[in-house]
Image (cartoon, rainbow, N blue to C red):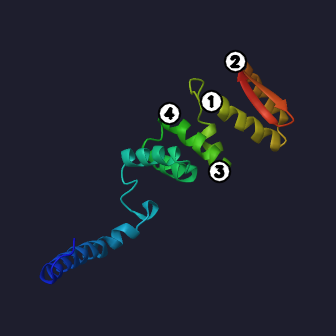
Amino acid sequence: MILPLGRRRRASGFATTVLAGALAGLLAAAPALAKTPAADDRIGGSAYGSYLAARHAETISAIDDAARFMEQVLATDPDNDRIIGHAFVLLVNDGRMEQAEKLAVRATAKSSWAPLANMLLVLKAAKAGDFAGADKIRDELLTAGVILEDTKAGTRWKRK
């Protein structure tokens, strides 16, 4: 349908007004849209926020961000075994072995992540040439029901 000339001007004036309003809204929001989550200072402002950010980063396979956020949670609750374990696993997955080793020594017999922590400590001791220390940790693992197997592909573990 073709509008008469007068109606076309009103319709195009209305469309121009709507378009100008939308453009003004986008320009006003541009600074907020330009921020990335990592640059946003509000993320990680609380332990709960950092925990949720870590879990979300983990689900989208952003392990480096997940580890960083979980370290923030650990700083607020340094004696929580579950948080220590979660941070440890994320640090190992991110390849940050020095930080992971500091957490590995905090594993207890009741820690669900203790076998992985002890395996890391065995490897650390063996790399340092402390084979007696490595064997001692392996024996403790065996007593706890965890078997370490050395294969061509590396060390693997399983439960008895």
Q: Would you say the residues marked 1 and 4 are in contact, meaning their CB atoms lie under 8 Å apart?
A: no
Q: Would you say the residues marked 1 and 3 are in contact, meaning their CB atoms lie under 8 Å apart?
A: no
The relative height of residue 87 versus residue 158 in the rendered view (above or below) is below
Name the residue type under label 2. Gly
The residue at which mark 2 appears reads as 145
Name the residue type under label 3. Arg
The residue at which mark 3 appears reads as 96
The residue at which mark 4 appears reads as 82
Q: Which of marks 2 and 1 is nearer the N terminus?
A: 1
Quadrant containing the N terminus in the rendered view: bottom left
Q: Would you say the residues marked 4 and 3 are in contact, meaning their CB atoms lie under 8 Å apart?
A: no
Determine the residue positioned at 30% across, 76% down.
Answer: 27
Q: Which of marks 2 and 3 is nearer the N terminus?
A: 3
The residue at which mark 1 appears reads as 114
Q: Which of marks 1 and 4 is nearer the N terminus?
A: 4
Q: Crowding at label 3, few (<14), some or many (≥20) Cα neighbours within 10 Å? A: some
Q: Crowding at label 4, few (<14), some or many (≥20) Cα neighbours within 10 Å? A: few
Q: Which of marks 1 and 3 is nearer the N terminus?
A: 3
The Cα atoms of the two marked residues, 1 and 4, are separated by 11 Å
SS for callout 2: loop
